Image: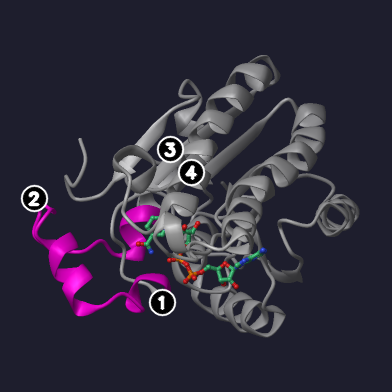
Amino acid sequence: MKGHVALITGSARGIGREIAMVLAKRGANVIIADVNLQQAEITASEIEKEARCQPAGEIPGESNSSVAEGTYAIKAVAMQFNAANGSEVESAFTHISEQFGRLDILVNNAGITRDALILRMKDEDWDSVININLKSVFLCTKEAIKLMSKQRYGRIVNIASVVAFIGNPGQANYAASKAGIVGLTKSAAREYAKRGITVNAVAPGFIVTAMTDTLSDKVKEEMFSTIPMGRFGEVLDVANAVAFLASTQSGYITGNCIHVNGGMYM
Ligand code: NAI
């Protein structure tokens, strides 16, 4: 990924932050896009400090020719925009095009939950989850494809969820948004395959982040009992799967979804 430019939405913290870190460690310049600029700036500077591309041969499966010997610095830039707002997304991509001149990787990671049983769910909870989790993927994918088409190369990875496949009481809005991502992923994959752009999804199970921290112990225990591996997922488990799909090595894989859930759904 040396020299590649990667945009990760919602990457100020959590899974997105770890994805940005792993891509940067593999040599990509990363754009830390988030609504929370202050946290995005902190993350960007931490990544610049920590991510030095590994010397050739130390990344399993990475060909020696793609990574030069020795370590080198990468660029990590913080950018503030709401991924669900069309005009903010458009101007962010114009800025990316001007600053970097290219975009090789887009990871649509920004997401929220507004949980409630359907009978108690407010319209605005439905709308905000569908907008931030699903419409954002449409908006960012549209802009990314314009840049990637010119290059005849691109990797788009969308973060779905295990609940897209199994459902979850109290998460009708969230499950619908994530199932929508799976359909959008396959459609985009078919539309742009001939332009060298792959579009795939990663569906995490229960991953330890601020998002899952808010769940009650009872819910956590129930979830835990459904995981054959007997542990919750770590952000790195997800980031490693994303890094593979975002790399040049996954070139013949498109319209797919990698499940990262410890066997919770198979
Ligand atoms: P998190 O809440 O820790 O981080 C989400 C980030 O997205 C935050 O930095 C937030 O500021 C940002 N964000 C929220 N709305 C945004 C918007 N409109 N535009 C730009 N940025 C925005 O969440 P976490 O756990 O890291 O989740 C990341 C993704 O992974 C989400 O799409 C989530 O649905 C998905 N996921 C998480 C799982 C988990 O167990 N944590 C399981 C399955 C999927």
Rounded to the nearest whole Å, what is the CA distance between mark 2 and mark 1? 23 Å
Of marks 4 and 3, the one in the foreground: 4
Residue plotted at (62% across, 82% down)? 39
Q: Looking at the picture, how far across and down is residue 72, in whole percent?
A: 58, 65
Q: Residues within 10 Å of mark 3 (few under 14, many from 20)?
A: few
Query: For this rendering, which residue is in front, 189 or 78?
Result: 189
Rounded to the nearest whole Å, what is the CA distance between mark 4 and mark 3? 39 Å
Q: Looking at the picture, how far across and down is residue 182, in whole percent?
A: 49, 34
Q: Residues within 10 Å of mark 1 (few under 14, many from 20)?
A: few
Residue plotted at (46% across, 32% down)? 249
Q: Which residue in the protein does label 3 denote?
A: 63
Query: For this rendering, which residue is in front, 34 or 77?
Result: 34
Position of the C terminus by quadrant: top left
Q: Which mark is residue 176?
A: 4
Q: Which residues are magenta?
A: 210-238
First along the sequence among labels 3 and 2 = 3
- Considering the numbered disc 2 on the image, is that residue within a helix, a strand or a loop? loop
First along the sequence among labels 1 and 3 = 3
First along the sequence among labels 1 and 4 = 4
Q: Which residue in the protein does label 1 denote?
A: 210
